Structures are given as C-alpha cells and as structure tokens.
Image (cartoon, rainbow, N blue to C red):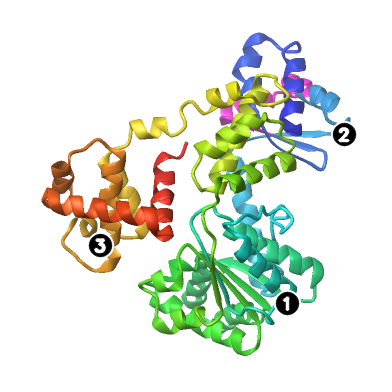
Amino acid sequence: MFLLDQWKKVLNKLENEVTAVTFDLWINTLTPIQYANDELILMAPSVTAKNQVNQPGIFEKITKCVRQEFTPYTFVRVTENQEYEQNIRKQDEELEKIMKESPNLKSKFNKKYTFENFVVGKSNQVVCAAMQSVAEHPSQKFNPLFIYGGVGLGKTHLLHAVGNYLNEHRPDLNVLYVTCEKFTNDYVDSIRNGKEKSNLDFRDKYRSVDVLMIDDIQFISNKMGIQEEFFHTFNDLYQNNKQIIIASDRSPKEMSALEERLRSRFSSGLIQDIQEPDYETKVAIIKKKCSQEGYLVDEDVVDFIAQKTGTNIREMEGILSKVVFYSSLLGKTHATMEDAHEALKDYGETEKTNLDAEKILNTVCDFFKVTKEDLIGKKKNKEIVEPRQLCIYLINDMLNIPLTAIGTIFGGRDHTTIMHARDKIGNQVKVNPHIRTLVNDIKSQLLKY
C-alpha cells in the first residue's frame, strides 16, 4: 500500500510537470514494482516507453518528484518486462550456481510464512500442531511426517514455517526445502553430467542434511528412476535419525503409480491431511491478511469474500488484494461493498463465458498428466477412469450440454454411461473430501480470474 500510495502522489506532481501527451502516453503507463534500499524500480510496458521516460528532460522530472515523496536519496530505475524477467532469471541462475557449489547452504524461507501468521481452524489444527511439534523436536516426534491436502490450503506455508522456526531456534541444523521438481532436476543433471563428482555432489546435498522437506511429492509418480533415488535418500536419512517432512496433494495410498516400498515408508510415520477451511476460518484468514498488509476493508466485504470464494486460500487472498487495489485507485482509504462488487463483477464469469468442453478436457489432462486420447478412449485402468469420470462431471456441471452430446465427445459412449459417471462423482463430492478437493482445484484453474 505504501508503494502504491506514494506513486500516486508522484503522478499527481508529474501531471503538472510535463505535457498531457507525455504524461498519458508514457509516464502514466509506468508501474512501480519494487522499492528497497532507496531504489525505486518502475516497469514500462515496452522498450519504446522505457526509452521515452529515460530521456534526460523527462527522467530528471520523474526523479525530482520521486525524491519529494520517497526520500531525497532515492534512485530511480526504469525497466521493461522482458529485461526485468531476464534479471530475475539471472539472479535465480546465480543462486542455483551457489547452491551447486555449496550443497550445504541453508534454504531460504519466506519470512511471512511463520506459525504465528498461520490461521488455525478446525480444518487444519491437527496438522499445524504436528508441524509445530516436529519443528520443536526434530527427529524425536513424528518421522517421517507426511501432510496432504488440496491446492492453496497452506501446506507450503507450514513447510516454510518449520524452516523459519528451525533457522531461528536451531541454527546448528542444516535444513533443506525443495520441491519434487527441484529434486528431479538435480538428479537428472547429476546423471547428464556423467561425472562421479556430480553424483557425489547430489548425494552430499540431499543426504548430509538434518531436516529434509520435500513439497509436491505426488509428481514423483510414474518416474521410476527418481523413485529409486528418493528411496535410497529416504533410507539414508531415516537410518541416521534425520527428520523427513513430505507434502503432497493426496495421501500415499491414493498415489497409484508409487512403488509399494516408498508407500510403506511414507506411511511409517504420521500422515495428516489439511481439510478445506470452513467459513469461520476463511473470515479469520482474510482478517489476518488485512492486518499483515495494512488493508482497511468494511466488515461486510470480509463476509462477502469469504462466501464468494472457494477453498483455495491463495485465490482468496488474491481477490482481497484486487478489491483493495480497486478501492485505492478511486482514492479511498478503505474498501466498501460497492468497491467489492465492482472489482469482482467479472469474477468467474469471463472465463466461464468462453469455457467449452475442449478447455475442460485439456485442463483435466494437464492436471492428471494423461493424454486426451486415453481420456476419451477405452482404457479402464484407475489412472484413466477417475480423470475421465471427473471430466464428464465437470462438463455436465459447468456447461449446458446434453448427456448424449457428452457421450459423443467421449468416443460415442451412450447417455447411461455418462449419467453413471456424472452421478458417481456427484455423490462422491458430497462425502469424499479427496474428490471434492480435486473438483474444486480443477474448477479454480478453469474459472481463475
């Protein structure tokens, strides 16, 4: 809010310093994206716009007005999207190089993700208590600890909370947090290099830690070579009494392409799910976010967002930010219901208007990592049948298409087969949290604003 408010003041000053054409075409298109260490970074929409505002006469006026509203020593830098992304990519590559050269370097954790900032409700109180217990007594309580739940329910927040707690209270421990994708890429790189040192560096990185946290472990399914390596990594850490924490979007028994020996090891410790937040928890999360970010919103706006949104907490926080941003553009100090209705008038509707069966098919295929040919084909193995039935349910639920037409989409199946798939998933959504989470996650992807 500070950055946005200060930039609006700068714009008010600049409007009187330059011509209307210059202001409208170039200056008003700038977006403040970062302010740190007395440096303000402005994003221009194109290289042309960047070059225009960097002209001596214009840039000097921008700098002058910025220093009046920020600090007298503020340095202004104008970049554009491609250049900014290249810089970020370069920074990531440099960090990656450091990580490879120093395998035991501590992981970096998001400082906002702490136990104090995690909103505890009925849906997550058990898993939060388990994570706190492991953070306070690594390798002594639950090892391994396996947590699972749908997208946006707080798994990554809790992993970072453990990391932040250990870095503060047990700086002697080597704590490593990686995604399953990162673990996979590191392993593939060690093989591709074909050098004994590369393999040793990989094993040293992952087997010399005191606490290993792996996020999104479900992506290890169907990757036999990666499962083999993770099996040995797991065993080495476990036998040396090192803490292992694993996060997934599903429980081990629901990971059908997982080797039985890994499933057995994942299940040897504590397995705990994060359930969908209820209304009261969602309200508490929104209020916590407002407190952290300094947002001022009316009470009925909090209620409106909690009721309007699904179970994805990240999505809910994004909607809150959108409402507050819209309110600030109107020069208001707090967001009202009028602002919320206006900011969210197209929420979920624009994408739904353009939604068709093809988009749902492709989204389900991407979500489950299956091919379209298999989805609409005749295969009857569980890895294909469940996604197929979910897809049928979603098409029927979200589109006004007759059952016979859906049957045609799925290789000429008759309407009774389509009806069976629809009703089966419809009933499971009511009683099976896993299926309900899958449906909500896919819908969130289809209807994201």
Q: Which residue is mark 3?
A: 385
Q: Which residue is mark 1?
A: 137
Q: In the drawing, what numbered circle is on residue 73?
A: 2
CB under 8 Å between discs 3 and 2: no
Quadrant of the drawing holding the N terminus: top right
Other residues around mark 1 within 10 Å, as few (<14) / some (14–19) / many (≥20) = few
Other residues around mark 3 within 10 Å, as few (<14) / some (14–19) / many (≥20) = some
Decide whether residue 29 is among the magenta residues.
no
Eye-nearest disc, 3 or 2: 3
Residue 124 falls in which quadrant of the image? bottom right
The one of 280 and 128 positioned closer to us in this rendering: 280
330 shown above or below 140 = above
Residue at figure coordinates x 59%, y 32% from the top left:
322
Residue 290 falls in which quadrant of the image? top right
Residue at figure coordinates x 66%, y 52% from the top left:
119
User: Amino acid under label 1?
Assistant: His
User: Amino acid under label 3?
Assistant: Val
Q: Residue furthest bottom?
A: 239
| Residue 176 x %, y % | 65, 71
90 shown above or below 72 = below
The residue range painted magenta reads 42-61
423 shown above or below 9 = below
Earlier-in-chain disc, 3 versus 1: 1
